[in-house]
Image (spheres, grey):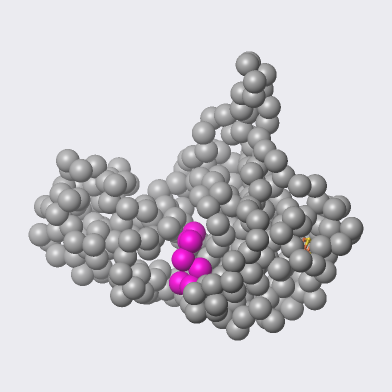
């Protein structure tokens, strides 16, 4: 059965007006031609190095980019355009962020009260806490009193208080033990099983490959490949883009093979394929705009992918 699409982001670009020298202004495009879709019941992992645009995408979906940002392209939530007005209405209700750490919580307020926030009720908070095995005593605790595992569950509860249909988890696992990271991923899987869509933004590529349904690989602010997570588990021969293959090969269990060079800075991008300066397969054809192609059940932005 085909899953219904919850979110579609197409050709998204985000730029910022910056001051160059003196009072001269220039536009810095940090995300370009970025595409993702999220379906009901699905975990979509977004993988890529720092500065690849992962967190900025989360802010664009939630409508919380800084005022000097300019956004182009289309974003649709359940088939309807995600305008700023609609983002305001849905944020924290249908579309919710799972905060990254307890640093997000007010250290001077008891967690029960914080989770209730402006959209919840005491009954709902207790229902959500019970779901995550958080007893009544946790309501009365301050953030600093939470153990690591409790904190993780409280953070998921802050997103779940409103029964959101689309959850965005931005780096939910750094600092967690392997066991705790697995437990957190298990919570996201349960939420997906209930028909919600989960966007998992992560540096932890291993975890993304193991727990997601699909993986979108970002590089220098654009999507280079989106494919079933099972392809990432199989390895390079199942993947399509040279950068995805390089990410796989850079994992410790696959030999820690480094990629020469660095991801380009938004203000100094090469023309054509953004990965070209590091790509062993580049040809002249890679210096032009690279179209997105559908190959073997995935999408790839590479001239020579087969
Ligand atoms: S388009 Fe060319 S340079 Fe870019 S990843 Fe593909 S082969 Fe490499």
Q: How many marks?
A: 0
Residue occupying image coordinates x 29% and y 61%: 152
* Lateral position of residue 141 relative to residue 118, left or right: left
Instruction: Answer with the quadrant where ligand 1 appears in the image.
Output: bottom right
Residue at (21%, 69%) from the top-left corner? 133
Give the quadrant of residue 159.
bottom left
Q: Is residue 94 visible?
A: no
Q: Quadrant of the N terminus?
A: bottom right
> Above or below — where is 289 with respect to 22?
below
Picture quadrant where residue 8 is located: bottom right
Q: Is residue 297 visible?
A: yes
Residue 255 horizontal side relative to residue 244, left or right? left
- Name the image quarter holding residue 17: top right
Residue 134 part of the magenta-drawn span: no
Q: Quadrant of the C terminus?
A: bottom right
Find residue 134 and report its horizontal and vertical position in percent: 19, 65
Query: Farthest residue in the top direction?
Result: 23
Residue 107, image x, y percentages: 20, 43
> Is 204 included in the stretch rendered in magenta?
yes
Could you tell me residue 246's position as x and y percent?
Answer: 64, 69
* 60 relative to 71 in the view: left or right: left
Q: Measured along the vertical axis of the image, is residue 235 above or below residue 47?
A: below
Residue at screen point 62% across, 58% down = 218
Please say if 287 is above or below 294.
Answer: above
Residue range in magenta is 201-207
**Outermost right residue:** 284
In this picture, residue 99 sits left or right of residue 221: left
Of the pair 21 and 215, the residue shown nearer to us: 21
Give the percent coordinates (x, y) of residue 47: 55, 62
In the image, residue 267 sits, relative to residue 54, either above or below, namely: above
């Amino acid at each position: 059965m085909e899953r219904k699409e919850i979110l579609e982001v197409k050709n998204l670009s985000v730029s910022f007006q910056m001051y160059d020298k003196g009072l001269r202004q220039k536009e810095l495009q940090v995300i370009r031609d970025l595409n993702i879709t999220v379906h009901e019941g699905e975990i979509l992992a977004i993988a890529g190095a720092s500065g690849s645009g992962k967190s900025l995408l989360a802010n664009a979906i939630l409508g919380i980019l800084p005022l000097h940002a300019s956004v182009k392209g289309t974003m649709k939530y359940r088939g309807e355009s995600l305008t700023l007005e609609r983002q305001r209405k849905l944020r924290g209700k249908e579309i919710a962020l799972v905060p990254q750490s307890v640093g997000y919580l007010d250290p001077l307020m008891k967690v029960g009260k914080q989770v209730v926030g402006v959209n919840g009720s005491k009954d709902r908070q207790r229902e959500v806490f019970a779901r995550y095995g958080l007893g009544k005593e946790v309501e009365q605790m301050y953030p600093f009193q939470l153990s690591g595992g409790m904190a993780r569950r409280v953070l998921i509860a802050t997103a779940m208080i409103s029964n959101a249909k689309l959850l965005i988890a931005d780096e939910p696992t750094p600092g967690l033990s392997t066991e705790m990271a697995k437990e957190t991923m298990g919570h996201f899987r349960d939420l997906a099983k209930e028909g919600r869509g989960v966007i998992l933004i992560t540096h932890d590529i291993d975890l993304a490959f193991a727990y997601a349904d699909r993986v979108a690989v970002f590089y220098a602010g654009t999507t280079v490949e989106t494919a079933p997570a099972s392809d990432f588990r199989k390895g390079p021969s199942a993947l399509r883009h040279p950068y995805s293959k390089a990410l796989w090969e850079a994992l410790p269990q696959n030999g820690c093979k480094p990629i020469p060079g660095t991801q380009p800075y938004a203000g100094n991008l090469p023309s054509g394929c953004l990965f070209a300066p590091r790509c062993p397969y580049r040809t002249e054809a890679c210096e032009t705009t690279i179209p997105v192609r559908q190959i073997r059940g995935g999408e790839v932005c590479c001239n020579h992918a087969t």
